[in-house]
Image (cartoon, grey):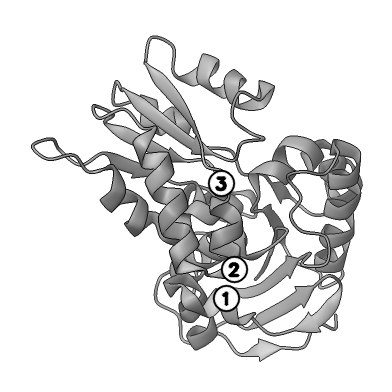
Amino acid sequence: MRIALMDAGIGLLAAAAAVRRLRPDADLVLASDPDGMPWGPRTPADITARALAVAEAAAAHHPDALIVACNTATVHALPALRARLEPGLPVIGTVPAIKPAAAGGGPVAVWATPATVGSPCQRGLIDRFAEGVRVTEVPCPGLSDAVEAADGAAVGLAVTAAAELTPDDVRAVVLGCTHYELVAGRIGAAVRRPGLPPPALHGSAGAVAAQALRRIGARPAPQAPAMGTLTVIRSGRAAELPPAALAYGEGRLLQSTGAVLGGRP
């Protein structure tokens, strides 16, 4: 079994680690675009073109499924990716976990990039899954870039600023960018309020990993006789995990549990 994941940068680590925990025997292909990141400020057409190039580099390794582990790419490029690759290669997108967060009745805060806050896609998810629930959209300028660079000080500043915009009474916080899941612990600590229960944090990595397995008819099997391999492709080039990835538990898990191979198909 081979599962590919794609993103502009290291935001794919959370979903890749989730796949590794569910199926340690799965071979993983991580495809990113450091030469073109960040994708957020680009036009939808440019995002789509870059996403297609990254997806095709991953598809050359003949995976059984491709996870688009990026909210921005899912919003702008998912139809084009599916038109290009399906039905031969199932493509699984990533959307903010607004539905499970709202199921608790709210109030809910959705942390997202400034480009995503107020976007038709995010507003549509809120209208569809959070009817009757008070939802606050919280812009997080600079947070994904700080996570990408593993800049702890910048992460702290961005998290603190977003926490100040988060209402004190929220019961759930949606991590609306895949990068944010890598610093979930810091976010959780920042949104705690004295005397109130800590808000639940809702990411997408676990659900996306499980959906990828369902799409290919595979079941979770946390115990495996052999560990799957890890192939890293960065802007079409064979690579290893970048140093910033190893600043996070998810990156260290992948490094320790999968032999890093070259990026050749």
Q: Which residue is mark 3?
A: 177
Disc 2 is placed on an element classified as helix
Q: Which residue is mark 2?
A: 149
In this view, the residue farthest toward the top is 132
Q: Which mark is residue 244?
A: 1
Q: Position of residue 124 (x, y in %)?
A: 61, 19
C-alpha separation, residue under disc 2 versus residue under disc 1: 6 Å
Query: Disc 2 vs disc 1: Cβ atoms closer than 8 Å?
Result: yes
Q: Position of residue 158 (x, y in %)?
A: 47, 50
Residue at 59%, 29% (x, y): give it.
117
Q: Is 118 left or right of 56, judged from the image as shown?
A: left
Count of labels shown? 3
- Say few, some or many: other residues with alpha carbon within 10 Å of mark 3 (under 14 / 14 to 19 / 20 or more): many
Q: Is 72 left or right of 143, judged from the image as shown?
A: right
Quarter residue 3 falls in: bottom right
Q: Position of residue 147 (x, y in %)?
A: 54, 62
Disc 1 is placed on an element classified as helix
> 114 or 179: nearer the eye?
114
Q: Is residue 37 above or below residue 84?
A: below
